[in-house]
Image (cartoon, helix red, strand yellow):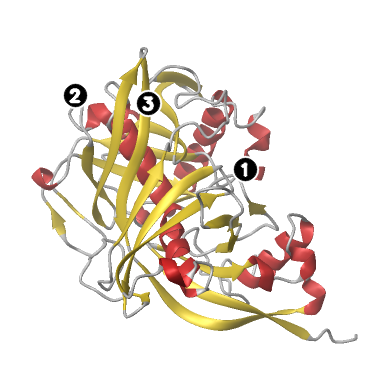
Amino acid sequence: MASAPQIRIPATYMRGGTSKGVFFRLEDLPESAQVPGPARDRLFLRVIGSPDPYGKHTDGMGGATSSTSKCVILSKSSRPGHDVDYLYGQVSIDSAFVDWSGNCGNLSTAAGAFAIDAGLIDKSRVPEDGICTVRIWQANIGKTIIAHVPVTGGQVQETGGFELDGVTFPAAEIVLEFLDPADEGEGGGAMFPTGDPVDELEIPGGRLRATLINAGIPTIFVNAADIGYHGTELPGDINDDKVALARFETLRAIGAVRMGLIKDIADAPRRQHTPKIAFVAPPVDHVVSSGKRIAAAEVDLLVRALSMGKLHHAMMGTASVAIATAAAIPGTLVNLAAGGGTRNAVRFGHPSGTLRVGAEARLVDGKWQVTKAVMSRSARILMEGWVRIPADSL
């Protein structure tokens, strides 16, 4: 058998929020992968190490979880009012599939920092000390994200005292603004695809109340109590239960059809990244995965969310946008779990701790509009240089 040489591609391995991914500049990719298509998908799969029937990603850069099986492409933007275009691929672990249907809110943080480090931002825009504002066009969903990135000595500041539950060490705070986060143009092009803040889904064995929302990322919210949970569950409580995971996937597929994201539940496996599914509950005293105790008074509600078929160890950034948006609109299940009424910010509990998110919502002509959602994250370069893959991978 003839051996295939390896090719090396400039790449940066970064943490953004509670996720990690491999970042590329578009111009550095092999020519065949500079355009959407099978070659780009094969590249991402080989870089991450998928599909891996062992579920370990031993032969790639992935971490065998939905939070660490990600690739990102950035390029200078030709879109007026934007600095960079940001394209995100969620790589399946056990199948040869890259999902381009949504964004990663956590890696949006790293996208702003990477844009500066990679020379995609004009040097005249980068202060010697202060905040560099990076306007990002999120190409997957056609939305604008503004990253406020701290700069020290003309370089991205990565270390600092900002603590983010789900991340071991403190770092520098990056503030993200998701502009017009609702209405991704899918499922009828509305924040609430069915027109209602609460729906009833026909599921095996009965009916289930749910809030279906397009904000940040299409998300299905249900009450924890309605599906036999408390909202204090940790990853092992769900991820070690194959029956429970199968029920969640069935519910996700039913909700996806109702949202107009797929035509039939049989299409759900080809759209693994979206919609997300989450369950909410009023606050109670509980213990998170680090062993830290969280008092009920410290949070407004509890949220647990699944990503790529598993309960997330913390909270996806895009799902946090959905939480902020839904919490700001009276009558949604998220809003009711937080105590109801109108609010422009909530602090919610997740398996690793707590997170504060905000959203600006207003009622216009009888319909709720959300102008932006805001949250803080951090990002750090873990390694930079070249990633290598066999030449015959493309």
Give me the C-alpha separation between circle 2 and circle 3. 16 Å
- Camera sees residue 312: no
Q: Nearer the viewer, mark 1 or mark 2?
A: 2
Q: Amino acid at mark 3?
A: Gln
- Callout 2 crowding tier (Cα within 10 Å): few <14, some 14–19, many ≥20: few
Residue of label 1: 271
Q: Nearer the viewer, mark 3 or mark 1?
A: 3
Lower sequence index among marks 1 and 2: 1
Residue of label 3: 369
- Residue at coordinates 26% horizontally, 39% vertically from top-left? 230
Query: If the image is split into quadrants, where does the C terminus sit?
Result: bottom right
Residue 149 vs residue 329, the one in the foreground = 149
As drawn, is 26 to the left or to the right of 105?
A: right
Res 283 → quadrant: top left
Image coords of residue 40 (percent x, y):
72, 62
Lower sequence index among marks 3 and 1: 1
Q: Nearer the viewer, mark 2 or mark 3?
A: 3
Residue of label 2: 341
Furthest-top residue in view? Answer: 366
Residue 110 vs residue 281, the one in the foreground = 110
Query: If the image is split into quadrants, where does the N terminus sit?
Result: bottom right
Lower sequence index among marks 2 and 3: 2
Image coords of residue 376 (percent x, y):
29, 55
- Does residue 241 lie above or below 131 as drawn? above
Give me the C-alpha separation between circle 1 and circle 2. 34 Å
- Residue at coordinates 50% horizontally, 33% vertically from top-left? 251
